[in-house]
Image (cartoon, coloured by chain):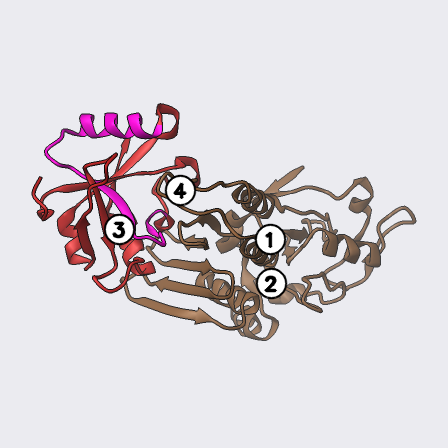
Chain colours: A brown, B red
Amino acid sequence: MNSQNGLTIAPFNSSSYNFGLNYETGQEQFDSNALTSEKMKNLCIASAISIVVFFSASGQHFMKPIKQNNLNIIIEHNIIPKTLKYNTKELDSNKANLNLFPINEYLNNNMSIIGFNSDNNLMGGVNTEKMNKNVKKIKEYASFKEDWNGYGAEPFSPKLLEFSEYIIRNLKIQPEIFPTGRQSIQLEYEQDSGRYLEFEIFENSINMLYIDENGNEEIKVLENKIEEINKVVSRFYE
Amino acid sequence: MNKVIEPQENLYRAVKPYAIYKKEGGRISSALFKCSKGVSADREGKRTQKEIVTDFIKRFGEDQVKAIAYFDAEFCYQLPSYLKYEPLPENEYHSGIYDSKEKIELSSIKAKKLADYCKLISA
């Protein structure tokens, strides 16, 4: 296990150290025993990897969310030239074009990642700990009986739990989750500044509440579900 | 007991199950105050906090009551929410907190404000 800036990177297996892409040349670097690009892609899908992280030698970290067919997967050859990593102005302009975000804001979210180490080699790694914890919580909610909160709350419907699990498994950044006494599951994101983002998942709808650092509120019913949630959450951490 | 809950009177609600409602920062989630039948709480009713905690433990069991959230009625009135004293045969202090006279469930923003405002007692 390796740790960089609080993010733990667990190798897929020993051979994953031999697989990589040089981010300057974009060339694959792997030996005969290494994972192939295709295998790595399949591993990403199986592990619900949502983010590709580029670790630069200078210690700057950037990541790129990638989507394909509603699954988040790695794209092997979309390597950012090293020069852009060190030039803030160029990076800023490329943020918009390449959909790049500083990783530091996301470090506490235990997201799934693929990482390049300082030798430009893909280390390979997943950290789905928080997602798994949230999925486990939802499974626990399924066992709640009548009056589980001592105030007459009813058990959760399988439909709500399935929908909630689907949302959790497809979130790029994991929230804290809580059950309510009104047949809904609540997802919460909060920042030290006081900014707060909440999604309340019902069987057939999702309500959003956003509160900014000045206490201004925005309430919305989301139509596009997971796509919109991911978009709103990304914006919340920008 | 006076039917009207005076602003200075405190209201108490068991945080149950505590582990489920406790947030990473130590506060509690507003999900605690989202209930389809309105938020049940016990009014103070001239009891001491120690007596109130004992009453909760008697009702739910010691292992079930790890924390109790409390807040003054004035805050509920200012939200604004609708407070109603609704004694039950098994609990003479039972009261209900509703979004308004017309709406039962607290809105998300009111639940959030209540969660941010309330204080916790460890039982």
Which corner quadrant holds the N terminus of chain A?
top right
* Amino acid, disc 1: Ser
Look at mark 4 in the image and give the residue it sits on: B21
Distance from disc 1 to disc 3, alpha carbons, whole Å, reads 46 Å
Q: Front-most of A230 and B74?
A: B74
Kindly report which numbered mark, 1 or 4, lies closer to the viewer in this rendering.
4
**Which element is circle 4 on?**
helix
- As drawn, the label of residue A58 is 1
Q: Position of residue A231 (x, y in %)?
A: 52, 68
**Which element is circle 1 on?**
loop
Counting every numbered tag in the picture gives: 4
Using the rendered image, report if marks 2 and 1 lie on a common chain: yes
Question: In the figure, B65 relative to B72: above or below?
Answer: above
* Amino acid, disc 2: Lys
- As drawn, the label of residue A85 is 2
- As drawn, the label of residue B114 is 3
Kindly report which numbered mark, 4 or 2, lies closer to the viewer in this rendering.
4
Using the image, name the chain to which the residue with label 4 belongs: B
Using the image, name the chain to which the residue with label 2 belongs: A
Which residue reaches farthest right? A32
Q: Position of residue A33 (x, y in %)?
A: 90, 46
The region drawn magenta spans B32-60
How packed mark 1 is, by other alpha carbons closer than 10 Å (few <14, some 14-19, many 20 or more), is few
Q: Front-most of B12 and A23?
A: B12
How packed mark 2 is, by other alpha carbons closer than 10 Å (few <14, some 14-19, many 20 or more), is many
Asked whether disc 3 touches disc 2, contact meaning CB atoms under 8 Å apart, the reply is no
